[in-house]
């Protein structure tokens, strides 16, 4: 059951993120339940009218014919839209035609069932809501306005005695027939509400997933999968403000891979990319869950360690340095094995004693260059207090 619902959610998500043709095909399938209900309800009414003549309404025959014909039509249109290859212009024309036909079909169905009752109110509300989620607002509001105008105009004609009209769900004086009509209205309304609720829930769930995916892509480095520079900088600013409020220490580590240019020049950029990916994964595996690793530059990474003092941050940097030495890259031809190392600079301080988060990064960066000049593959500590002295 859960698998089936998940597949339906996935299908609906594909439609809302898809082309105009896919959205139109989705509307074709979505219109089916209403017409099936009209057809089956009319068949049930005709059968019961054999024993309870009060239930009989001549429009029941029209309901059977319309429900069956409309169901077949929308099925055929959905299959046509699925299989037919279309250009972009043809897709937009197909979409406009489907919306227009859906509106016409809705007008006929509402006039057949009755323009003023619970079922038609729910159908109108649901169709407009789903239409606005899938298609341009101007197009949907125009169709809705035309549909309401036609229904109201016909209702005025009926109220003035210009036409004889007894819809399927009209109020009647027979208790038996009224009970049947009320039961059918309640059943139809319940099923349509369930359908519309599921559809809207699936659409919003798809949007949430798409929004989360967009946010993830906007904050993630595409090569390494860790935070990009922008996201890392924003996270550091947030951690810095938290340190200012709580008085807890904050540590920043800047690390730069040693001799990375030589790896690119000698082994190729593909091997360089692989090295960066393995380094990023290694750092993520070494840090705590509340720490953050971001790619700050080409081969430069930034580690944010909330709550870590200088001693703990240095130990974390040492662990990372040791873990990087254990990375094994595949050998190419007869070239020597690649040994990955990095130079680490650590800045650790309570934020109140430091000018800004940017200052912390600058001092960690300076400490990293000190590690480079001292022979690489080592950790150098520099506190903000020392930097401002």
Image: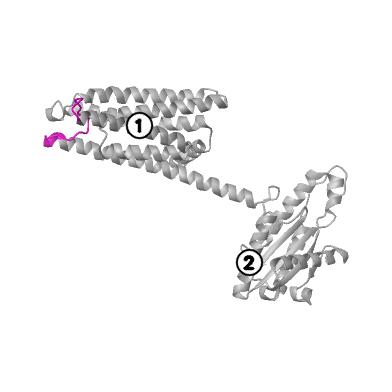
Q: Residue at 80% of width from left, 55% of height from top?
A: 340
Residue 284 location (% of width, % of height): 67, 58
Give the residue pinned by disc 2. Answer: 239
Give the residue furthest to the front. 160
Q: Callout 2 environment at 10 Å: few (<14), some (14 to 19), or many (20+)? A: many
Helix, strand or loop under label 2:
helix
Q: Is residue 117 visible?
A: yes
Extent of the magenta region: 160-177
Whether 174 is among the magenta residues is yes
Q: Is residue 325 visible?
A: no
Q: Residue at 46% of width from left, 45% of height from top?
A: 204
Q: Nearer the viewer, residue 282 or 65?
A: 65
Residue 103 location (% of width, % of height): 38, 29
Q: Quadrant of the N terminus?
A: top left
Eyeballing the image, is 113 above or below 208?
Answer: above
Q: Callout 1 environment at 10 Å: few (<14), some (14 to 19), or many (20+)? A: some
Label of residue 147 in the image: 1
Q: Please name which of the two marks, 2 or 1, marks the residue nearer to the observer.
A: 1
Residue 77 location (% of width, % of height): 43, 24
Q: Nearer the viewer, residue 374 or 34?
A: 34
Which callout, 2 or 1, points at the residue further toward the start of the chain?
1
């Amino acid at each position: 059951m859960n698998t089936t619902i998940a597949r339906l959610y996935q299908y609906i998500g594909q439609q809302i993120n898809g082309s105009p043709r896919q959205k139109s095909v989705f509307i074709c399938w979505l219109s089916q339940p209403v017409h099936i209900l009209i057809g089956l309800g009319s068949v049930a009414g005709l059968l019961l009218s054999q024993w309870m003549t009060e239930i009989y309404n001549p429009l029941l025959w029209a309901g059977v014919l319309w429900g069956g014909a409309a169901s077949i039509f929308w099925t055929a249109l959905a299959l046509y839209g699925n299989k037919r290859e279309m250009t972009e212009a043809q897709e937009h024309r197909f979409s406009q035609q489907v919306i227009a036909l859906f509106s016409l079909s809705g007008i006929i169905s509402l006039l057949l069932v009755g323009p003023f009752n619970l079922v038609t109110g729910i159908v109108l509300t649901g169709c407009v809501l789903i239409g606005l989620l899938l298609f341009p607002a101007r197009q949907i509001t125009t169709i809705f306005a035309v549909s309401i105008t036609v229904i109201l105009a016909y209702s005025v004609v009926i109220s003035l005695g210009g036409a004889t009209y007894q819809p399927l769900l009209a109020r009647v004086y027979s208790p038996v027939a009224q009970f049947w009509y009320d039961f059918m209205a309640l059943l139809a309304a319940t099923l349509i509400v369930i359908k519309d609720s599921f559809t809207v829930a699936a659409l919003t769930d798809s949007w949430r997933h798409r929004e989360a995916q967009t946010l993830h892509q906007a904050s993630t480095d595409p090569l390494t999968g860790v935070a990009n520079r922008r996201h890392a900088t924003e996270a550091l600013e947030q951690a810095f403000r938290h340190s200012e409020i709580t008085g807890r220490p904050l540590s920043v580590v800047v690390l730069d891979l040693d001799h990375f240019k030589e790896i690119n020049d000698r082994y190729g950029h593909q091997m360089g990319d692989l090295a960066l990916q393995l380094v990023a994964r290694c750092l993520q595996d070494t840090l705590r869950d509340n720490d953050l690793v971001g790619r700050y530059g080409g081969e430069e990474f930034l580690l944010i360690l909330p709550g870590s003092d200088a001693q703990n941050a240095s130990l974390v940097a040492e662990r990372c340095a040791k873990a990087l030495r254990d990375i094994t890259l595949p050998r190419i031809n007869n070239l020597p094995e690649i040994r990955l190392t990095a130079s680490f600079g650590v800045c650790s301080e309570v934020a109140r004693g430091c000018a800004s988060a940017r200052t912390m990064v600058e001092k960690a960066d300076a400490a990293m260059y000190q590690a480079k000049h001292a022979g690489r593959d080592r950790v150098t500590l520099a506190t903000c207090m020392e930097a401002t002295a």
